[in-house]
Image: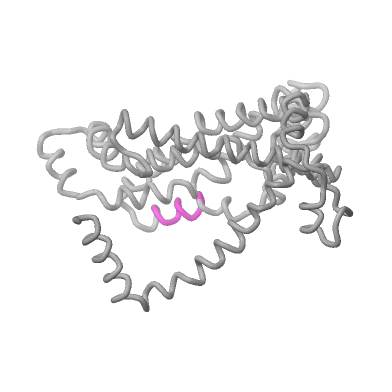
């Protein structure tokens, strides 16, 4: 009886404020059309898709031969997929381990700056790389680390090397280059959320800590970090969920066949074999596998944080 009364009360609120709910209809429609309708395309992963099998690409989906899980069997026996899967996990793990903490530390340092003009100047400088496309960022790094770039010319002038170091063509250096360039471009922008979270902390907590003789480091560890822990956990779960997204735009613009062994990831594999080679069923199977793993990681990350920290996405 209580649940029925609760449902009626909820519907009453909706009906009373129906004009406000009408505003979200366009957004819901966009989500349905561009997010849910395309999900029908996962059927291709269970087909031997032939674009000429029907009168239209959509008709061809249903008229193509159904092969059930053959694409996935092919997937897990494909050496290129296994290599790309391994590279994706390694690069994403590197980015989480080395780059995830930096925006937190950056936000703490920026919020502690007293001079407003200096703070805003630093923030602008740190945010700016985010607005550059990966094509521009790659061009900048080529000017710095390319065969005739600043670093190689400097090393040659100092007689440290006889020939140029192939930063973009060296399998041992490529992953480090990916992490460093991603950090340069995104850490400043990622710090915005933490800066906003720190700004919401009650300043009286810091004043009380100062009166008690707490140092700045103690204030950070006992007030700042615990106060923004919900934000940290939320972003960490979302980042774990995207562990199979190692950055298509970045790697696609930076890599070449020379560094496929350490740089080829799932998204570049989908592009190369799914689109360029027109292996649509294989590419869709890779994408579906990626999505399923992402869902499992989000659910698992949320479960672990709820269990051990009593905080999560839901």
Determine whether, in the image, residue 21 is placed left or right of residue 206.
right
Q: Tell me where residue 246 appears, x and y as whole percent.
A: 62, 37
Determine whether, in the image, residue 180 is placed left or right of residue 296.
right
Q: Tell me where residue 220 appears, x and y as whole percent.
A: 27, 36
Q: Nearer the viewer, residue 101 or 90?
A: 90
Residue 154 seen anywhere in this rendered image of the structure: no
Q: Nearer the viewer, residue 310 or 96?
A: 310
Determine whether, in the image, residue 292 is placed left or right of residue 236.
right
**Residue drawn at x 55%, y 33% as measured from the top left:** 95
Q: Is residue 265 above or below residue 280?
A: above
Residue furthest to the front: 1
Q: Tell me where residue 106 appears, x and y as whole percent.
A: 41, 41
Quadrant in which the C terminus is drawn: top left
Q: Is residue 120 magenta?
A: yes
Residue 92 seen anywhere in this rendered image of the structure: yes
Prevalent SS, magenta region: helix
Query: Quadrant of residue 138 in the image?
Result: top right
**Residue drawn at x 82%, y 29% as measured from the top left:** 258
Which stretch appears magenta? 119-126
Q: Nearer the viewer, residue 110 or 291?
A: 291
Q: How is the image coloured?
A: one colour
Determine whether, in the image, residue 15 is placed left or right of residue 42.
left
Q: Tell me where residue 64 appears, x and y as whole percent.
A: 82, 48
Residue furthest to the bottom: 19
**Residue drawn at x 48%, y 71% as measured from the top left:** 25
Quadrant in which the N terminus is drawn: bottom left
Query: Quadrant of residue 74 in the image?
Result: top right
Q: Is residue 50 above or below residue 307?
A: below
Residue furthest to the right: 52
**Residue drawn at x 72%, y 32% as measured from the top left:** 72
Q: Is residue 309 magenta?
A: no
Query: Quadrant of residue 14 in the image?
Result: bottom left
């Amino acid at each position: 009886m209580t649940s029925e009364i609760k449902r009626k009360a909820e519907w009453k609120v909706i009906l009373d404020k129906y004009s406000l709910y009408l505003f979200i209809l366009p957004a819901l429609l966009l989500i349905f059309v561009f997010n849910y309708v395309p999900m029908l395309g996962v059927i291709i992963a269970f087909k031997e898709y032939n674009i000429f099998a029907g009168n239209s690409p959509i008709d061809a989906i249903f008229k193509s031969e159904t092969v059930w899980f053959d694409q996935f069997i092919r997937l897990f026996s494909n050496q290129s997929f296994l290599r790309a899967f391994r590279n994706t996990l390694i690069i994403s793990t590197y980015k989480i381990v080395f780059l995830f903490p930096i925006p937190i530390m950056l936000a703490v340092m920026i919020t502690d700056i007293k001079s407003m003009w200096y703070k805003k100047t630093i923030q602008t400088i740190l945010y700016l790389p985010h607005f550059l496309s990966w094509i521009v960022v790659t061009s900048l790094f080529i000017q710095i680390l390319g065969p005739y770039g600043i670093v190689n010319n400097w090393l040659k002038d100092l007689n440290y090397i006889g020939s140029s170091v192939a930063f973009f063509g060296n399998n041992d250096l490529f992953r480090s280059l990916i992490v460093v360039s991603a950090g340069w471009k995104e850490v400043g922008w990622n710090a915005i959320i933490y800066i906003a979270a720190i700004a919401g902390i009650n300043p009286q907590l810091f004043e009380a800590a100062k009166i008690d003789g707490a140092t700045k480091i103690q204030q950070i560890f006992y007030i700042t970090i615990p106060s923004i822990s919900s934000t940290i956990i939320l972003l960490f779960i979302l980042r774990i969920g995207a562990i199979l997204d190692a950055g298509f735009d970045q790697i696609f613009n930076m890599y070449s066949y020379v560094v496929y062994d350490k740089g080829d990831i799932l998204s570049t594999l989908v592009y190369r074999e799914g689109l360029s080679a027109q292996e649509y069923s294989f590419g869709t199977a890779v994408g579906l596998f990626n999505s399923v793993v992402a869902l499992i990681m989000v659910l698992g990350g949320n479960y672990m944080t709820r269990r051990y920290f009593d905080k999560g996405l839901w």
